[in-house]
Image: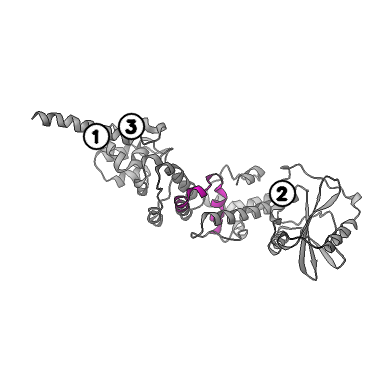
Amino acid sequence: MTSLVLLAPRQAAGRSDLLERRLRRYHPRFQGAVRTLALRHSRLADLAASFPALLFALAVPQVRLDPARAIAGVIDGRPLAEAAIAAGVPLWLRKLPPEAFARPIPRLPDGELFRRRIANYLPRSPKLAPAWLQLVADAAEIAHEPMAAWIAREFTREPGRVKTARLRPIWLWAWFSSQPTTLGHDLIERPWTPDMRIDAARSAASDWRTIVALQVNLGRTPIADMWLRPGRMAGYDFAPLDSMAAIVDEARAMRNCLKTFGSSLAHNRARLWSIRKDGERLATLRISRHRDPLPNIVELKGPGNTEVSRELWWAARQWLHRHDLSQLDIRQCDWGTAPLDRESWMSLWRPYWLAKRRIPHWLPIAPSREALELL
């Protein structure tokens, strides 16, 4: 009889110690709120083991969500699925450890296909779980559910290769990849597909962002002042690259980085020319002021940035000096002061704003170089 009397307190103490160990796995910032709720009832305390995410969501509820009904349902022994729905917690979160919840649980995807996929991509390490969960939420919010499942997979496979600071261009590129009637889609050279790996996606998204920058820097109107005149010298034709389409075509044909010069062109710091012979592209020429008030040849490269012949250099010099350079008044803009093209900016982002029913602070309605740089 005595042993039975002593056993009950020991069992209770053991359960209390076990509960405390589980509660300590939550983020220190929220342990107090979680502990207070868990101590209200044994069924709430049991959630620390059976459904850590639900216990956290009830203790740290989402904005404008009253957890009272869900809490009452747990205490009354109602199915946890009902409480999870009332608390806005997807059931697939049930497998995540307490360490995953370092901030209030954001809105998360919960479609049927997503639930089946995400079960295969849960984080292996509790330490990585908070970053994993935030990535899933961000991808779903900025892009869509398929992208959320994709980033969960990529982060689980190789977390070190997923640079969390610069993923927004990937989210946007992926979203526009599925929007064929938009300008953003028209600017994509390699669309997102679920079988891509993170490095390929980052490269394709970076290419898209570069073309986006070219578009909003130049707009739809050709550059009016190319500084110099088209012409022919020693059998070579010098053709202006005075529009986005011309620059993209040249970059693709010559396998070079011309698409990155949007800001330089907009700030009146460079002009680009194509050198051709009998219609064949031979070289790309960049004219700029370089330690000199007069324009100079600062770059002359063949396909794939190869060196060109002495003969071609001489023809380019002759063509340049055919102009009266002393009469050119090239006024460069201070970096960051040239306005972006508003029409292109609005045409590019309007479909996204409408689809998401909001204008994010990082993608403002007014064209912004700061916002463009932070993409």
Q: Earlier in the sequence, mark 3 or mark 1?
A: 1
- Please name the amino acid that badge 2 sits on: Ser
- Residue 310 lies in quadrant: bottom right
Q: Is residue 70 left or right of residue 250?
A: left
- Please name the amino acid that badge 1 sits on: Arg
Q: Give the x, y percent position of residue 292.
A: 85, 45
Q: Nearer the viewer, residue 238 or 331?
A: 238
Q: Give the x, y percent position of residue 174.
A: 54, 55
- Residue 259 lies in quadrant: bottom right
Residue 25 falls inside the magenta stretch: no
Of badges 2 and 1, nearer the viewer stands 1
Q: What residue does disc 2 label?
A: 263
Q: Earlier in the sequence, mark 2 or mark 1?
A: 1
**In the structure shown, which secondary structural element does the residue marked by tag 2 occupy?**
helix
Which residue: 68% across, 54% down? Answer: 215
Q: What residue does disc 1 label?
A: 15
Q: Earlier in the sequence, mark 3 or mark 2?
A: 3
Which residue: 36% across, 42% down? Answer: 97
Residue 8's place in the image compared with 311, above or below, is above
Which residue: 33% across, 34% down? Answer: 23
- Please name the amino acid that badge 3 sits on: Arg
Which residue: 40% across, 39% down? Answer: 101
In magenta, the rendered stretch is 152-177
Asked if residue 175 can be seen in this view, the reply is: no
**In the structure shown, which secondary structural element does the residue marked by tag 1 occupy?**
helix
Q: Majority secondary structure of the magenta segment? A: helix
Q: What residue does disc 3 label?
A: 35
